[in-house]
Amino acid sequence: GHIGRKNDVSNETEETPPIDLESALEQVMGDKSFLEMLLGEFMKNLPDQMESMRAAVEKNDADTLTKQAHTLKGASANLNANRISGRALEIEKMWRNGDLGEAMPVIAELEAEAICLKEFIDRIEWDRME
């Protein structure tokens, strides 16, 4: 039974970590401290990005929403934070379909993903990583 799976976050988290660390490390040629810095920057900017996405939906400002979603999609994809980039892509598509009404729940999911990612990053033992 796959019913109600989507809301069972604990389950989803086990299946796919919020970030594919191996691929992310490969992209920075195995430079752990660089990756740690990039992730720190990404997490620092995330709350502002989500705040402006929320504001854009409230003002029905599709342009700002898409720009933010697009930026977020690119930044998260670069870091292999695939769950976040997936949500950002959903928001981008909504705009193309002229359907901003559905954006808020996805932004809420994004915020939940951001918390997952932060907790995941906080648990990384950089010095013990291969």
Image: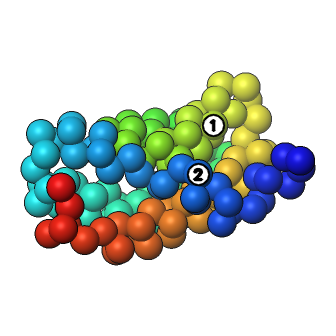
Q: Which mark is residue 90?
A: 1
Find numbered disc 2 in the image and state the secondary structure of the residue it sits on.
helix
Regarding residue 7, the answer to whether it shows in the image is: yes
Which residue appears at 86% of the width and 54% of the height? Answer: 4
Which part of the image, by quadrant, shows the C terminus? bottom left
Which quarter of the figure has residue 8? bottom right
Res. 75 visible in picture: no
- Is 86 drawn above or below residue 104 in the view shown? above
| Residue with the mark numbered 2 | 15
- Three-letter code, disc 2: Glu
Q: CA distance from mark 1 to mark 2?
A: 20 Å
Classify 11 as above or below 96.
below
For this rendering, which residue is in front, 45 or 130?
130
The residue type indicated by label 1 comes to Glu
Instruction: Please say if 5 is above or below 88.
Output: below
Q: Position of residue 49 (x, y in %)?
A: 44, 56
Identify the residue at image location x=27%, y=58%.
39
Residue sitting nearer the eye, 83 or 87: 83
Locate residue 12 relative to residue 86 in the image: left or right.
Answer: right
